[in-house]
Image (spheres, rainbow, N blue to C red):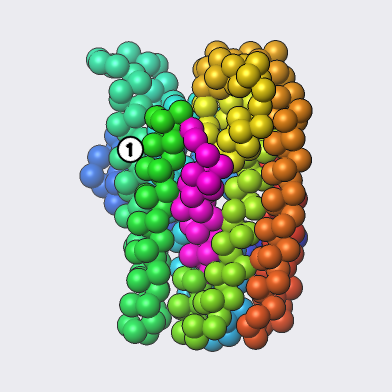
Amino acid sequence: MTADLDAADLRARVQGVVDRTIARQSDVLTAVSPDLAPLVDALSALLAGGKRLRPAFAYWGWRGAGGDPDQDEQAMTAAAGLEFLQACALIHDDVMDGSDTRRGLPAAHRRFAGVHRDEQWLGSPEDFGVGAAILLGDLCLSWADEVIFGCSFAPATMARAKAVYDEMRTELMAGQYLDLLEQARGGGSVERALQVVRYKSAKYTIERPLHLGAALADAPDTVLAAYSGYGLPLGEAFQLRDDILGVFGDPEQTGKPAGDDLREGKRTVLIATAVERSSPEQASAIRRHLGDPGLDASGVAELRAIITETGALDHTEQMIDALLTQSLASLDTAPLDPTAHEVLTGLAHAATRRTF
């Protein structure tokens, strides 16, 4: 994935936008009070890494749709603004999931709880950590808007882009709620799990960033349709790969403890498929172990074995392959810039074969 994400020096340029934005906002916050500096430090640590997928799809969506080369820097800046929306989603998602780590570091709410504990302040460290993380996520949501809509595209172009961006945020929050609902209900059908995937991840990660780039390039509806045909199945395949990595991934690669999704009780397509295909004994083991925060290595191994033995792992891999084929076929239905077409093809393969 690295080579495709680094095309047009994308990751370095995105990091430049992120760093400049954080520096500017740091001046604003510390002018209010130096006590706000830990918010900046936490965000700097979180945004020092990451795959930069959303900026990549937004930028190459713009390039593919024939964006004006004179506006290349503005397009890259707008695409980079999506990193702040992603930071908001990650920070809030970790709070909702009770996650301990993110990208190999303490999750934001754990980080702030640690500060409270170290300073021996009054009240609950955990409550303080959650409150601080929610506020940091809210700041990121605000800063995303500032970065994206501070770009100097024509007003009509920005209006089209804002319509896409508004819908993207609404779909993301809807998907997050549906995810919470699935956990509360104890999971359900594969169909319901796929609905969560579609709105929490697929549209938000690939389809809508592509549409945002296309809107900034004033692209016709044919390009938007091709991007939907490419982006939706690819986004679903991307999340299915993420679900597999959440159970079978190498912690050195993923930055999360082995089997962490099992401890969090995530009701993924992978798990829903295993439940549908399980024997009574296997179903009992899934109910017993899934969502146990103290799940040890033997419990993780038992659930992994059930997922494999029921055929859920193989079935999910087959779904990924089928979705990738569908995605790439749609990419050929619109006349796109050849370089962008090549990069988007590479990203599709990399996103579905990744190990992190």
Q: Please give left or right for residue 313 compared with residue 182 in the image.
A: right
Kind of residue indicated by mark 1: Ile
Where's the N terminus, which quadrant? bottom right
Residue count near mark 1 (Cα–Cα under 10 Å), binned few <14, some 14–19, many ≥20? some
Start-end of magenta stretch: 187-210
Q: Secondary structure at mark 1?
A: helix
The stretch drawn in magenta includes residue 323? no
Q: Which residue is mark 1?
A: 134
Which residue is located at x 58 percent, y 64 percent?
Answer: 231
Which residue is located at x 70 percent, y 68 percent?
Answer: 328
Q: Quadrant location of residue 65?
A: bottom right
Q: Quadrant location of residue 152?
A: bottom left
Position of residue 256 relative to residue 296, above or below, is below
Q: Position of residue 114 (x, y in %)?
A: 42, 21
Q: Please give left or right for residue 170 compared with residue 295 in the image.
A: left
Question: Looking at the magenta stretch, what is its main secondary structure?
Answer: helix
